[in-house]
Image (spheres, rainbow, N blue to C red):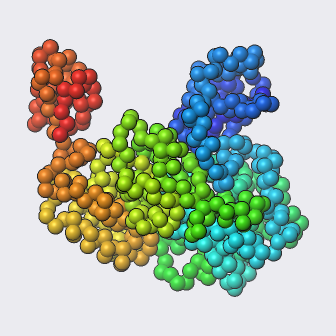
Amino acid sequence: MRIVIGQGSCGIAAGAEKVRKALLATDIPVENISITGCIGMCYLEPIVDLYEDDGVTRLVRVTEKDASAIADYVRTGDISKIEKLIVSAEDSEFLRKQTRIALRNCGIINPEAIGEYIEKDGYKALRKCLTELTPDEVIGVIKTSGLSGRGGAGFPTWFKWNAARKSEGDEKYLICNADEGDPGAFMDRAVIESDPHNLIEGMLIGAYAIGAKHAVVYVRAEYPLAIRRLKKAIEQAKAEGIIGENIFGTGFSCDFMIKAGAGAFVCGEETALIESLEGHRGMPRLKPPFPAQSGFWHKPSNINNVETFANVAWIINNGGEAFAAMGTEGSKGTKVFAVTGKVKRSGLVEIPMGKTLRDVIFDIGGGIKSGKAFKAVQMGGPSGGCIPAELIDTVIDYKALGATGAIMGSGGMVVMDEDTCMVGMAKFFLDFTAKESCGKCIHCRIGTKRMLEMLERITKGEGKEGDIELLEELCYSIKDGALCGLGQTAPNPVLTTIRYFRDEYEAHIKEHRCPAGECTELISYSVIEDKCRGCTLCAKNCPVNAISGEVKKPHVIDKDKCVKCGKCFSVCRFGAVRKA
């Protein structure tokens, strides 16, 4: 029996490393214990898979205290002690309802063992390209597949590769954008942590196609585990002759370099990323020229994100037609989403384009926590927009999502319930983009700041008539005048929340009321006398002693002392605290 412990960042944060150490301390042979990356079921971590001849038994929410029971099962076959840990049939549907291409090896193979990747047909596609296909034929396969950039823009991958290939110059660069900065997004991190050789293979194929001898991965420094595993994978590939000179004896050579970015969101924009790579401050360049003509060190360069490269080897092995058979007319293949927020099953979801938001949030994600009503979903991170409940059946493809005012983005999907203030949500994302603006252009540097100031006033109950119209005017001015994608898309969360939730803006401005009860300055707490039992629980938990009263008699909240922390509301067992 082989025991495999999920060791992605999510699993380790939940205690998977403690579980691994506890299992190593049992009588299970060390060689039978292995690790893997994130399988996507982040809400069930730590996860331990027991591989036997007749299949896999998945154990979820495992703690170090369960190690002895697992060891007993390995030794005796008595499953009674671990039955409570076995994943439910309902939770198993989370994976069964997905179609996994970019994530096909994630949570299955050991990311630190090149042999396990090779056993899964690893580097077979690279060998095929180098020995059977010309660079133009490789680009033709990618064109047939319809693969578009998964970083957000959805630009045809083959077109970018072809432009870089046709550019003159002996020195070219193939760059992977792993600077995943969207709040709530962790797709690229999971791929690098869980299947780094898949990224390397896709990049080598891309390098061969455009004629590049240098490959660079620009990755967030905040992803230390991903960086460590990628470094190890590169070392292993070099040792096997897969990276370096004369790969597979074909005459094709390519080296790899990792650059840890300092965490600037704007470096997700390809020209700002190039500036950072060159040691400059990450600020976008004017285009044209485009990177395909003048990129890294002013040499022809191609930039794609992690998920884009993660599809390449599968496409080469299975044919462009197989990938194009999935999805919609204008959006081919599958897409990975990081589903977070108020959803029951949070984690990584990969589905064919053409599925609906309902399919992801309710069918795969299990719906909303605590029986609350679904209110909206933020698609595309700070550059995207909020899609309301009435559009839950929107098809997931670039055109349909764009029609709502949102974007596909890199794949962040933040689910919101009835208790979410949409004005506050717009403020949250605008606060992010205002802080992350590089400051190069006035529209973005000053415009986002002015918009944020207005949203802060509105959420404090200090909004004025005409603020909504002024916000809209600022939004369109910034979109038209900003230099790069950060500024051009920063207004999207504001525009979509105004479009679909204008009544909430009006309630904040005209009634000085937050319908969701989330904006602290607009909330007040009071005790309902006929419901209060005088249990004193609220008074004992009040951090500022703002609640007074005798035992078994109604209590009173001093509104001058109250800091509106909501502790009294959350601890009251009798519904005696009113939040308004």
Q: Residue at x 34, y 62 (%)?
A: 496
Q: Is residue 272 above or below residue 8?
A: below
Q: Position of residue 74 (x, y in %)?
A: 74, 21
Q: Position of residue 149 (x, y in %)?
A: 59, 67
Q: Residue at x 14, y 62 (%)?
A: 464
Work out whether residue 278 or residue 450 is closer to the camera in this orientation and state it: 450
Residue 312 visible in image:
yes
Q: Is residue 256 above or below residue 516?
A: below
Q: Residue at x 35, y 66 (%)?
A: 491
Q: Is residue 144 left or right of residue 128?
A: left
Q: Which residue appears farthest toward the bottom when viewing the image? A: 168
Q: Is residue 343 left or right of residue 71?
A: left
Work out whether residue 204 or residue 297 is closer to the camera in this orientation and state it: 204
* Displayed quadrant of residue 80: top right
Q: Position of residue 374 (x, y in %)?
A: 37, 46
Q: Residue at x 19, y 29 (%)?
A: 577
Work out whether residue 248 or residue 571 is closer to the camera in this orientation and state it: 571
